[in-house]
Amino acid sequence: MKFSKATNYALHTMLFLVAATPNKPVSVLELAERQEVSPTYLSKILTKLVKADMIESASGANGGYRLNRNWENISFLDIIHAIEGTASLFDCSLDHGPDCPIQQVVLSAEEKMEKHLSNQTMSELVRKIKIVM
């Protein structure tokens, strides 16, 4: 199982924004430089996070991105779903429907992973490590 690079950048971006000074926008350039990624590519990822209502953009000379939700409630799963969507990781190629024993095993594992990711918040991670913006 592998998440896209976009999800990797989204998770790190959200970590930086949670650690940043509240209500102080962080520029896409600064976020991109911290991750050594193109600002254009990161902008596409930020657009998905804006659409998911996790962050908001502020325009102008001191513009950038800042959190739009209570940072205590942003889980890893929220961010992953914003980038990857909510479709199942596995879809049985045979027409067994929900009775497919292979799909049942994989979906059970996926449910456990999603539960774990939904219980892991960015705020918990920021408390464990010290990030300076």
Image (tube, rainbow, N blue to C red):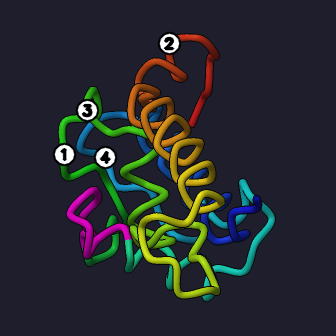
Tag 1 residue: 69
User: What residue span does the magenta drawing correspond to?
Assistant: 49-58
Which of disc 1 and disc 2 is earlier in sequence? Answer: 1
Category of crowding for the residue at label 3, using alpha-carbon neighbours closer than 10 angstroms: few (below 14), some (14–19), many (at least 20): some
Which of disc 3 and disc 4 is earlier in sequence? Answer: 4
The front one of 115 and 50 is 115
Q: Are marks 4 and 2 in contact (CB under 8 Å)?
A: no
> Who's the residue at 27% across and 77% down the image?
60
The amino acid on which the numbered mark 3 sits, given as a three-letter code, is Asn
With respect to residue 31, does 84 lie above or below? below
Q: Identify the mark at residue 83; answer none if there is no mark.
A: none
Tag 4 residue: 24
Residue 133 figure quarter: top right
| Number of residue marks | 4
Which of disc 2 and disc 4 is earlier in sequence? Answer: 4
Disc 4 versus disc 2: nearer the observer = 2
Q: CA distance from mark 4 to mark 3?
A: 19 Å
Please say whether residue 42 is one of the residues in the magenta stretch: no
Q: CA distance from mark 1 to mark 4?
A: 14 Å
Q: CA distance from mark 4 to mark 2?
A: 19 Å
Q: Is label 2 in a helix, a strand or a loop?
A: helix
Tag 2 residue: 127
Q: CA distance from mark 2 to mark 1?
A: 18 Å
> Who's the residue at 42% across and 29% down the image?
121
With respect to residue 26, does 20 lie above or below? above
Q: Identify the mark at residue 73; answer none if there is no mark.
A: 3
The front one of 51 and 24 is 51
